[in-house]
Structure formats: C-alpha cells, structure tokens
Amino acid sequence: MNGHVRRCGGTPCVCQFISELEEEVGTYRKILLAGLVIVVVELVGAFASGSLALASDAGHVAIDLTVNGTALAIAARALRRLEPNPHIRFVGVCLQVVLLFVVAATIVFEAYGRIDSPREVKPWPLFVAAFIGLLGNAYQYRISGRAKNQMHRGIKVHIASDFAC
C-alpha cells in the first residue's frame, strides 16, 4: 500500500490528514509537558524566594495548561477517529474558570496578608526560576511550529505574549 492506509485513495489523501493529526498531538504533548515543568519550577521558585509575582505566574501557566490539555484531548480523539465530543471543550472551560477564581483568590488573600507583614523577596531563586520559565516559553514557542489552524495561531500568539512579558 506504499505507506497508505487501506481506505486511502481519495483526494485529498487520508494519510496526510492522519500524519498532520499525529504531529499535532505530539506538539500539544510537548507544550503541555513544558508547561508542567514551568509550573513546578515557578512554584518552587516562588516558595524559595517568597515572590507572589512568580506564584501568580505559575497560576497563569496552570490556567494555560487547561487550554493545551483541551486541545490535546480534541486532537487525540480525532486521531482515534472518534466522534467529536462537545463536552471536552465545556470541561476545559470549566477548569479554566475554576482555576482562575482559585488563583485570583489566592493572590488577593496572600497580598492582603503581606500588607500587615511584608516579606522579603530573595532575588536569586526568583531570577533562576523566572529564567527557566522564560526558556520554557521559548521552547514552547519554537515547537509550536507553523500555525496550521485557529487553535494553533491562538496558542502561538499567547506563548509569544508570555515570552514578551
């Protein structure tokens, strides 16, 4: 069959679509894994340095992971040729909303506590964790490749804005 699947033969070739989906799933997995590393490094750096800014960025990255995880779930489902499930997006959005409120409430609570008793922020753990986070964003941007659809473009632009800030 020359590398083609049994049902292939139409125009456009089904094999090309499957190959693109496999690449998309792999890219989403790499972006998700890099995001998880960034969250862990930033949380460790936030606790080591006492930086609320670093902790809030870890929360931001965790919220971004729900977008990437949702995209991965949709692409993996399409790769297995299962029917689209509208609940995947709904669950992803619900996770984003819950995480957003938890992160915002945590930041407000911690910031209020620091008004009465300010804490020293240790610079070196902050700089190291922030630099590793920056490298993680650069890696995510690099592997996101050419934006092939609206979801890819959105993720790539968001990563670029994270990288720039």
Image (cartoon, rainbow, N blue to C red):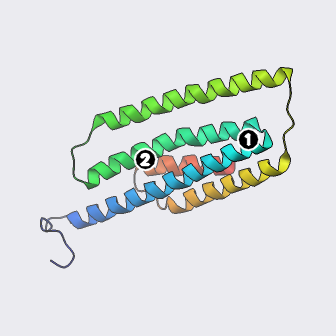
Q: Position of residue 60 (x, y in %)?
A: 60, 38
Q: Secondary structure at mark 1?
A: helix
> Pointer 1: residues within 10 angstroms few (<14), some, or many (20+)?
some
The residues bearing labels 1 and 2 have C-alpha atoms spaced at a distance of: 33 Å
Residue 69, by quadrant, is top left
Q: Position of residue 115 (x, y in %)?
A: 83, 22
> Pointer 2: residues within 10 angstroms few (<14), some, or many (20+)?
few
* Residue at image location 49% in from the left, 33% down from the top: 96
Give the labeled residue for mark 2: 151
Towards the viewer: 65 or 109: 109
* Residue at image location 51% in from the left, 54% down from the top: 33
* C-beta proximity under 8 Å, tags 1 and 2: no
Q: Position of residue 23 (x, y in %)?
A: 38, 62
Considering only vertical position in the picture, is 30 above or below 150?
Answer: below
| Quadrant of the frame with the N terminus | bottom left
Q: Amino acid at mark 2?
A: Met
Give the labeled residue for mark 1: 47
Considering only vertical position in the picture, is 87 above or below 81?
Answer: above
Residue 52, by quadrant, is top right
Q: Secondary structure at mark 2?
A: helix
Q: Amino acid at mark 1?
A: Phe
In the displayed structure image, the side of residue 49 where residue 149 appears, left or right: left
Towards the viewer: 22 or 48: 48
Q: Could you tell me if residue 90 is visible in this image?
A: yes
* Residue at image location 56% in from the left, 57% down from the top: 140
Q: Could you tell me if residue 161 is visible in this image?
A: no
Number of numbered discs on residues: 2
